[in-house]
Amino acid sequence: MDNRWNLDALYTGFDSPEFIGDCKKLDSKNEEYENFANTLSQSGDILEILKKYVALKSEISALTEKLLCFANLSFCADTNNAKANSYIELISIRQNRSSLADVKFIKWLTSSGFEPKTLRGTDLEECIFHFEELITKGRHILDDQTEQIISNLKLVGSSSWMNLHNVLIGSLTGKISTVDGRIEIKPISQIRAMAYSEDADVRKKAYEAEIRAYRKVEKAVAACINSIKGESIILARMRGYASPLEMVLTKNRMEKSIIDTMFSAIREYLPCFRAYYKKKAKMLGLSGSLPFYDIFAPVTAKAQSNFTYEEAAKFIVEKFSTFSRKLGDFAKNAFDNNWIDSEIRPGKVGGAFCENLFSISQSRILANFGSSYNDVTTIAHELGHAFHGHCLSNNVILNTGYPSPLAETASIFCETIINKAALKEADKESALAILESAISSAGQVIVDIYSRYLFETALFKAREVAPLSPEQLCEEMTKAQIESYGDGLDENVLHPYLWLIKPHYYNPDWNFYNFPYAFGLLFAKGLYAKYTETGSSFAEKYEFLLSETGKRSVTDVAKIVDVDLNDINFWKNSLELIKEDISKFLDL
Ligand SMILES: [Zn+2]
């Protein structure tokens, strides 16, 4: 077992004959696809046309994925790799080229009046959902010229505003006084990281420095958010959606009633989270309620540390195997065959991610493994993503894309397996640390996300009428936080500028990228609750569910395990699990 990944299964290098050959092959397939899209007509055998589309599209997707992932993974492992960097761009350009042909095909399909259900019993039966989705998408595509204008103007519109936001935040610094009284200028990201400091004074000073820094750019950033959301409102209207939210929900294959039900359940459980924040204030020795800057304050000793990478691997494989042999074997295979780059080294990107490589039915995971318990759960989380990919891999590649609310199902499920097992074996102190870390992150995903959803809803409503001033944006954010955190936090020390710093609000293609987090956590927890009820026979159903996430609506995916997402009790059961953790924490 190595602590660096091996990418040979993709390519042995950028100069290898296979890599060069596949680049050429992608070019010729793209050309073939363009010709195909340009010569579509309403006459001819539709089944043959669709077969040709599936074949071409599958080949192009697999080739693009293989080439792009090789470049991207090589770059992430060594950001000084200039060749990797330039190939990322070169292949992305090719990807863009084929998306123009996609639009032509979608429009042809939509206007053909074709009923995907008629594919039942044919070789293309498994693509029914894919075609249905394309037709829905097609109904919202405008004429060629308008689409061209939109895509050109987006580059100098919302995309530029997003870039400006990146530049403003990336170069933003704050002034903070050190212990010996000097004033230091630090990047905003470093100041934000001080929220985790053990020193109460550092946390408070960092928060104050952060707020001061935001005031310097608030007018410019407000212009960014107003323009980006304004563009979304215009586009949603032009494309015939009732609202930007409806546009997001369609993309996410779900109905609004699901998030309404989920948030109704969440509202009922907010008092539990508030009790946790109150307890945290007490543990920190505060007489009043918790200020925003103490949300991430450490209140427990660190969970039992010092896992070697080998020990982490052994622990994960062992615990995964208690759920299903398949999951355990899968993880073992990933460790044994060097799918994971866990080493911390200069030049490598930070954080952790998983890349599923459907073209070769494998995955690669990047992590920066220290030795803490958190590092172990991070690997387990990413292995969950990889297992999701594994379950999907028996589908045609067109059926491997799943919507964001389902993206974290397998990862959080795997994390839960590890957390439950670790809690069982932990002494009192470690148990407290594990619980606190789980509750604290659930608090972010439930309580904070709820406030961000409320804020974005209010923002869109107000933006329909006119742009918002920085003061109005701060006011809406504060209102949303009061509604969500309630008396859990000190309402005089909230974070009115979260709208300015959360990157999600600035990606024009990611409106409402908040509810998917809450959905992901609660859906995974709900599945785990089903598993504890049903026992080991659940594993097979669960794996089948994962394998279907690319070709059903979210509602229909949930039905596989007899879950009705419009039933508030499903969400309440998930929240009940977090409530149990909170009660344990309050008792310990
Ligand atoms: Zn994840």
Image: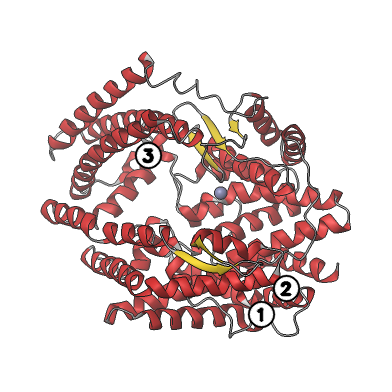
For disc 3, does the CB lie below 8 Å from ligand 1? no
The tally of labels here is: 3
Asked which quadrant contains residue 43, the reply is top left
Q: Earlier in the sequence, mark 3 or mark 1?
A: 3
Q: Tell me how far mark 2 sits from mark 1, CA to CA.
A: 8 Å
Q: Tell me how far mark 3 sits from mark 2, CA to CA.
A: 47 Å
Q: Tell me how far mark 3 sits from mark 1, CA to CA.
A: 49 Å
Percent position of residue 495, x then y: 53, 76
* Residue 91 seen: yes
The crowd level at tag 1 (other Cα within 10 Å; few <14, some 14-19, many 20+) is: many
Q: Is residue 45 above or below residue 251?
A: above
Q: Nearer the viewer, mark 3 or mark 1?
A: 1
Give the amino acid type for the residue marked by disc 1 in the picture: Gly
Residue at the right extreme? Answer: 427
Asked which quadrant contains residue 223, the reply is bottom left
Check whether the beta carbons of the residues at disc 2 and disc 1 lie within 8 A of each other. Answer: yes
Mark 2 residue element: helix
Mark 3 residue element: helix
Q: Residue 327 versus residue 124: which sits nearer the camera?
A: 327
Q: Which residue is mark 3?
A: 127
Classify residue 181 as left or right of residue 466.
right
Q: Which residue is mark 1?
A: 488
